[in-house]
Image: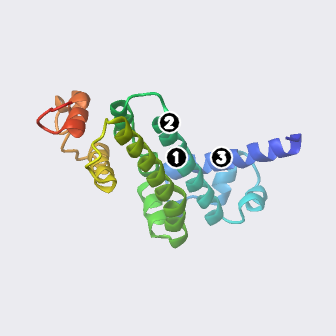
């Protein structure tokens, strides 16, 4: 890779990361291209040359976070860990896309048709494929029952994950229950009977 492209890619990534820092704390409407340029120590013209507009930059910020999330999930599902350990990582790892940004930023991307399509095609669909492969492999290994439909398993995993990442978690409603990751995971795997073949 030539030196110019390396410098170009680094500058582009710096702008994206600078925008990400600002969008963690402020609504998109409160962040100007000039402020992002100041954070990245580049000119306003440079940002327009790379991204075309603030909206174009926001798309790339979201795409970057989605890519990082997919990479993290892929590393979990492709690891040599046990099925239980993989499930724990998938459930107890926070969803960075929803947790790191300012609430107005989340509202903006969820109500923007282009953003919703991006999330659907580049995150949800790919995540579904990845988790389906993980579940099917676990069924082949005998660590997940072949009698339970994949869609139901995904819904249960998401139910646990959403509760745990919520500010009003039922599973983690007190200090004692916060210590019980292993029991929560065992209940997910084997039910309240604790039955294990």
Disc 1 to disc 3, C-alpha distance:
27 Å
Which residue is at the front of the view, 33 or 14? 14
Badge 1: how crowded within 10 Å, few (<14), some, or many (20+)?
A: some
**What residue is disc 3 on?**
39
Q: Secondary structure at mark 2?
A: helix
Image point (40%, 45%), residue name: 136
Ranked by sequence position, the earlier of labels 1 and 2 is 1
Q: Is residue 92 left or right of residue 126?
A: left
Image point (26%, 47%), residue name: 163
Badge 2: how crowded within 10 Å, few (<14), some, or many (20+)?
A: few
Disc 2 to disc 3, C-alpha distance:
36 Å
Q: Is residue 137 above or below residue 44?
A: above
Which residue is at the front of the view, 136 or 156? 136
Image point (88%, 41%), residue name: 2
Q: Nearer the viewer, mark 2 or mark 3?
A: 2
Q: Is residue 24 left or right of residue 36?
A: left
**What residue is disc 1 on?**
70
Q: Is residue 18 left or right of residue 180?
A: right
Q: Is residue 148 above or below residue 111?
A: above
Quarter containing the N terminus: top right
Q: Secondary structure at mark 3?
A: helix
Q: Position of residue 152 (x, y in %)?
A: 28, 54
Do tag 2 and tag 3 residues touch (Cβ < 8 Å)? Answer: no
Quarter containing the C terminus: top left
**What residue is disc 2 on?**
78
């Amino acid at each position: 890779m030539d030196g110019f492209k390396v410098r170009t890619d680094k500058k582009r990534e710096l702008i994206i990361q600078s925008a990400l820092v600002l969008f963690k704390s402020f609504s998109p409407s409160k962040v100007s291209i000039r402020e992002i340029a100041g954070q990245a120590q580049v000119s306003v013209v440079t940002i327009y040359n790379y991204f075309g507009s603030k909206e174009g930059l926001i798309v790339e910020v979201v795409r970057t976070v989605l890519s990082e999330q997919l990479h993290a999930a892929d590393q979990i599902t492709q690891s040599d860990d046990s099925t239980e350990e993989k499930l724990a990582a998938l459930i107890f790892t926070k969803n960075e896309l929803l947790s790191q940004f300012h609430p107005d930023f989340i509202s903006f991307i969820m109500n923007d048709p282009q953003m919703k399509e991006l999330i659907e095609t580049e995150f949800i669909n790919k995540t579904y494929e990845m988790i389906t492969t993980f579940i099917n492999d676990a069924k082949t290994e005998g660590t997940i029952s072949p009698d339970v439909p994949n869609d139901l398993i995904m819904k249960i995993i998401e139910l646990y994950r959403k509760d745990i990442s919520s500010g009003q978690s039922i599973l983690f409603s007190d200090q004692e229950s916060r210590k019980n990751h292993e029991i929560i995971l065992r209940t997910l795997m084997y039910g309240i009977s604790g039955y294990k073949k």
